[in-house]
Image (cartoon, grey):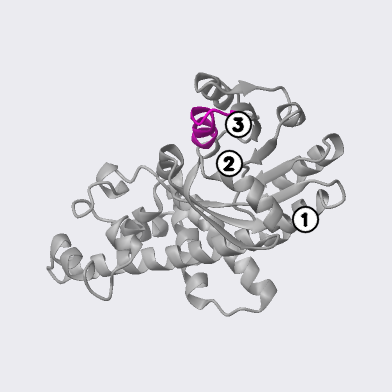
Amino acid sequence: MLGRIGFIGLGNMGLPMAGNLVTAGYQVTGFDLAPASCAAAQAKGIAIAPTATEAARETDAVVTMLPAGRHVVAVWTELAANLGPTLLIDSSTIDVDSARKAHALFAGHGGLTLDAPVSGGTGGAAAGTLTFMVGGSQQAFALGRPILEKMGKRIVHCGEAGAGQAAKICNNMILGISMAGVCEAFVLAERLGLSHQALFDVASTSSGQCWSLTTYCPVPGPVPASPANNGYKPGFAAALMLKDLKLAQEAALASGASTPLGAEAAQLYGLFDKLGHGGEDFSALIGFLRGQAADEGHRHGL
């Protein structure tokens, strides 16, 4: 029997995710600090509460989708002080330490907790095709899985508390590095007089094949659904890629892992963001590699 869900954080990702829960038959009560987000949520059949605690009260589970670790810890601290045993799922992308702190807040309250960050961007959130990388106990995962399945198509239990966040930052470090490599290849092809389609036809069926090429190609034409064909309107904004790459570098430093390519990708996206392109899709990095953003950077003294 479907029940009540509290959903805290109704932004670009949280809103369509909560909307899919409504479509699936759940009664969803939401909270967000932005009035515009609350208005959009109400239009999707989501009731709006005045506080995070009120959104979570008398629910079967609570989902949070927030910008950073400090926000998750703050909200979960508030909920821990006001709620009894419940299931809490955090789908934000945050640092592993903050995820573990959030889990620990409910360890003595009898609550079940999951860190369940997502992959798939705003398109996947709207379509209900997200991949969830989940950390937490087997008991919590068994209880949370039916809820996650209403918002995504692939649900992977990665291990205990924090394992979902660890998987997410490793995955997105691969994504940031591979997209930079694909962009570099297309820039080189352009300089050598090779058409975009010719490179795509070869690389997409050869050893250069990867998701950044075949699903999210950074040049217009070969993959009609990629943001390159829509003015680089973000499915996954460059600023968010930078956030994830920074999280990966923080984790690498803390754990002593060597990630030189991840560090280089973080530097590339950091400069791209400083030049004012953080709101564009992360595949728009190809403009920087063509020299367009570099020229702009010289003008700004970067």
| Residue 236 tag number | none
Measure the alpha-carbon separation of dots 2 and 1. 23 Å
Identify residue for label 3.
2
Question: From what the image shows, is residue 55 above or below residue 85?
Answer: above
**Marks 1 and 2: in contact by CB < 8 Å?**
no
Amino acid tagged 2: Ile
Label 2: which residue?
A: 147
Local crowd at mark 1 within 10 Å, few (<14), some, or many (≥20)? some
- Residue 96's image quarter? bottom right
Q: Is residue 221 left or right of residue 300?
A: left
Query: On the image, numbered disc 1 is attached to which residue?
Result: 101
Q: Which residues are magenta?
A: 15-26
Q: Give the secondary structure at mark 3.
A: loop
Query: Residue shown at 48%/28% (left/top)?
Result: 23
Tell me which label, 1 or 3, sits earlier in the chain: 3
Which residue lies at the image location 50% right of the left edge and 37% below the top edge?
12
**Which three-letter amino acid code belongs to the residue tagged 1?**
Lys
State which quadrant residue 212 falls in. Answer: bottom left
